[in-house]
Image (cartoon, coloured by chain):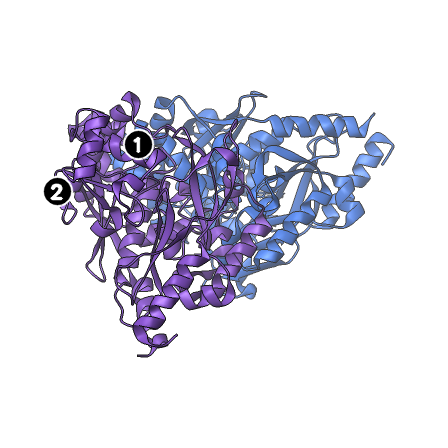
Chain colours: A purple, B blue
Amino acid sequence: MDRDAANAQALARLCASDPVLVDVRPAGQVVPGFAPTTVLTSGPPLPWDAYVGGQRNGVIGGALYEGLASDPVEAEEKLRDGRIRLAACHDHGCVGSLAGIYTASMPVLVVENRVGGNRGFCNLFEGPSPARLNYGVYNDDVHRSLVAIRDVIGPILGEAVRAAGGVPLRPIMRRALHMGDELHSRNTAATLLFGRELTPAIVDLAGRRPEPARRLLEYLGSDYVFLRLSMAASKATADAAHGVEGASLVTAMAFSCREFGIRVSGIGTEWFRAPLEKVEGKFFPGYTLDDVEFMGGESVINETVGLGGFAQAAAFALQDFQGGSADGMAAMNRAMYRITLGEHPEYKIPYLGFRGVPVGIDVHRVVETGILPVMDIGLAGRKGGQIGAGVLRAPLGCFTAALEAYTRHYNQS
Amino acid sequence: MDRDAANAQALARLCASDPVLVDVRPAGQVVPGFAPTTVLTSGPPLPWDAYVGGQRNGVIGGALYEGLASDPVEAEEKLRDGRIRLAACHDHGCVGSLAGIYTASMPVLVVENRVGGNRGFCNLFEGPSPARLNYGVYNDDVHRSLVAIRDVIGPILGEAVRAAGGVPLRPIMRRALHMGDELHSRNTAATLLFGRELTPAIVDLAGRRPEPARRLLEYLGSDYVFLRLSMAASKATADAAHGVEGASLVTAMAFSCREFGIRVSGIGTEWFRAPLEKVEGKFFPGYTLDDVEFMGGESVINETVGLGGFAQAAAFALQDFQGGSADGMAAMNRAMYRITLGEHPEYKIPYLGFRGVPVGIDVHRVVETGILPVMDIGLAGRKGGQIGAGVLRAPLGCFTAALEAYTRHYNQS
């Protein structure tokens, strides 16, 4: 077994990935293995009673929203005995933002990797309110937002995407990195570029269905819409690199309310888990670090493929949102080259002289250097809702555990 | 006379300017003093026979396009004897891109400073072909582009702008600086933001007039559309600061094929002139520095108000287009703070920790430090057309001449 050759192959697949948004459909129709009673949530899977706080509330909220239970007590019972089937997003080709709640009727972005043919899915941004189901809140307002996404935004967006013949995401992401996005906590330019690609189709639709078209345009006016697209694209990209015999390249990072986990290309679907690290952040007025609650998160799939914290030097405007300094961001970004296997041939950082983003986290390099992957994340509060944004590090324990498993599996290190 | 107080007043007007696109109309209808036989061109005015090369060709091309002469010989005669009235853009509230040719039927962007009530104008980007009238070329293709701008794009854009109730440009420019634009040689984000503002109005128009609406959307797909808007906004901004008794703040920079000129707030409308400096640039394949021809340029009004070369550290992606390095751009940008009177309260540079752009070039500071204003410009070739982009410096001679005039005028230095 030649580890370098295996990693080169995994890296090549990761860099060649060509994600295209091909459709928007209810999860129950397009996500493999999605039963009417399925609820997905973020992170390496846990027994139901291990979920706490906002993530637990989010799962219950999802069950109620989908009509799988008539009240929280019934939802809890059904989740415990399996009548409601709780599963991990990653096991269904999905990635969850924060708590990452998916139910069967929720529309998902269907992103296909034109090179590998594999698909990644992500559900839709709920809208600009800080109280959202994925931030652990379920109330009348959240319900109304979800219904609008299901009945208006999802269908008309799907229609526009199909009319446009699909939307290639790689060119948008490439350009957005030149326009101040790192494509995790900042997706402003990518959202605009995506909107421009769809506008001719929306103009056509507006002739027949002016009101949904107007609402879709309004929806595309939120700066965060593209995050879900970059997540689905990153999932399709990372999955393409998974399963290469002998590769020690990381193909998933994700966390639940309890712990962080990673998956490695050449060691099956096992999650290597460790407790969450402390976060450094900037908070909305009235909140502090003490108010932070982890309730899951899989948007760090973007860091897994070289975006977000691995492209911070493309997005100095993020200082305003998540704190830090330009020099600090550039230094963190440069450090990521020491734990990755290569540089992306198309995703480049102007400030670093158009150097490709560092891509392909290698378990060995993380353990050898002790440099932990940097991730740009949204922060949820103890009472639910978003309270700020910050930088999280993937815990070393995941990488040492993965390295041990790799060594056992291949009888080498 | 208190120079500091006068400069503070001029600077305050410059920083308070609130430019709004209110209309798009033919120059002959809205530009003050624009006769049917008027042709405007860039730079401090010269006698007709002093114009050479591409700028001369551009003026003749404009006269032919407008039907003011039936062939180049007749155009030359009429330009010499005044039957065609050649004048300077700046004397009519206009600013010219490169050769900067305006004729009466050309649509212009009408930008109003909501604080001062004064207006700035700029005609429209001709389209993505490197051969354009403002780059000294007039042929059948250029003619067709100008006719399309006059008959289709100008009218439908005007209709959309009026339907939208005008488009405030300050918020767009503020955001674009966080998205990799310096708003002179890079206007990618601003163009997208502007397009998004207009899209609802365009969707409405598409119901009644689908074909012009489709063509307007296509036109707004060019990354350079917003340059003309930033120029008109900068002209309205700089003019608001002009005419403050005692102020040594620069309110215009412009050049012709022959020379560079500046105007100063407190010393009337005189141009202080000097020969052009050498340019440093990056060239399209097949061209070199030897192919560069100066044919005028007033887009440097953007640098006059703190954009372009004064905001390079907001736009590292420009390296790819005009050469240089990220460190070099940051250093040039930082140097501009030494020759300016203040920092803009809203236009900020993320890389510099959200420091406001350096704004209000002071004649005294330029002469004292010897630091010359940096300008990001498009480069024209000897045979017409764009051949690259680069960095030009405003010549010291303009500033020493202005300082002498200031000292004479106010009996102090």
Nearer the observer, A253 or A46: A46
User: Where the N terminus of chain A falls, by quadrant?
Assistant: bottom left
Left or right, A75 with reference to A255: left
Residue at 42 percent of width and 24 percent of height: B166
User: Relative to A187, is A339 above or below?
Assistant: below
Instruction: For mark 1, name the chain.
Output: A
What's the residue at 77%, 26% (across, down)? B5
> Which quarter of the figure has residue A101?
top left
Examine the rendered structure and indicate whether residue A310 appears above or below residue A132. below
Residue under mark 2: which chain is it in?
A: A
- The image quarter containing residue B161 is top left
Residue B222 on image: x %, y %: 37, 45
Query: Residue under circle 2?
Result: A35
How crowded pointer 1 is (Cα within 10 Å; few <14, some 14-19, many 20+) is rated as many
Vertical comparison of B121 with A316: above or below: above
Q: Which mark is residue A57?
A: 1
Secondary structure found at label 1: helix
Residue situated in front as seen by the camera: B131 or B50? B131
